[in-house]
Amino acid sequence: MLAELLQKIDENQIRINRYRPFEDKEILREIQKYYRVDSVFSSNALEGSSYTLVETKILLEDGLTAGGKPLKDALAVVGLGKAYDHAFNLLRDPGLTKQDLLRLHGMLEGSLENDAVAGAYRQVPVFMTGSCYPVSRPEDIESQMCALLARTIQEREILHPLIAAARFHKDLVCIHPFADGNGRIARLGMDVLLGQRGHLPVVIPPALRQEYIAALEKAHEDDRDFLEFMARNEIETQRGFLRLINDAPLPNEDVEKKREKAALTPRRKR
């Protein structure tokens, strides 16, 4: 099943790559805005945010908060929006660094719970509610995160981009380096790693929250279900992108037609 899903991702990626590079900068900006809103909304919704997709869009694009909604939820939208914008600056890098993660986490300030310090690894023990597995001890976080970041750089060169990125997500959550915000940073880091290889972000619909949590919990022992879950959602993201640009002509379409015509001409003469 996983092999078939990865093959489908690769097939979709070939179709998507035919539209690149986007010479129309306005189209590129619209695509970035689309995924910015969608990714921020879905990631925050997975954490229980009360902001809807429309309310997220209005806050990110117009700066207007939703009446009657908690301030913390508004700050979560703004903070993750800033982190998402900064993530675009990392797409040409060879991976992620400790400084990258700390800076991304620092942008979540104001929306964190458990007295979490923004932009710093936690110094206190925490317990994962609903999980049977312990997270890393504070004194082990630095070395384990260093190993994870080094391993991710190596794995991205030998594994399928989706596999390397999803395993980074899983391992970061298992380590749980921050007192709060681990899920948001894990998902954003995964999307950065995918973007560095030319792939789209994995947008996880809030409706799949329970399936997502269950797969992540099981991944402590066997990550196949988690990888398949991420692969299916990457495929849905790709399909959404292809629908989004369905009316746009392929940049190389005229060239291909000319080549086909040239290839057929000698046969007609014969």
Image (cartoon, rainbow, N blue to C red):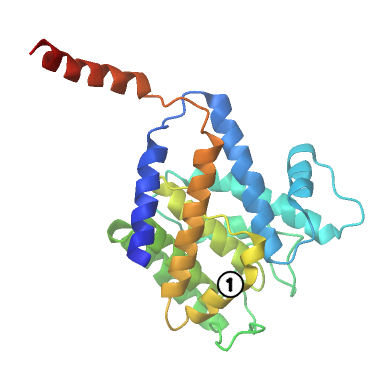
Figure quadrant of residue 103: bottom right
Residue type at numbered disc 1: Glu
Outermost residue to the bottom: 132
Per the image, label 1 sits on a secondary structure element best described as: helix
Where does the image place residue 260, in percent across and percent down from the top left? Answer: 24, 21
Where does the image place residue 238, in percent across and percent down from the top left? Answer: 48, 47
Outermost residue to the left: 270
Quadrant housing the N terminus:
bottom left
- 268 lies left or right of 12: left
Report how many numbered discs are placed on residues in the image.
1
Confirm whether residue 80 shows in the render: yes
- 94 lies left or right of 62: left
- 88 lies left or right of 251: right
Figure quadrant of residue 257: top left
The residue pinned by badge 1 equals 211
Confirm whether residue 201 shows in the render: no
Residue at 48% in and 63% down: 230
| 115 versus 14 height, above or below | below
Figure quadrant of residue 168: bottom left
| 195 versus 229 height, above or below | above
Residue at 47% in and 71% down: 226
* Mark 1 Cα-neighbour bin, 10 Å: few <14, some 14–19, many ≥20: some
Where does the image place residue 16, in percent across and percent down from the top left? Answer: 42, 39
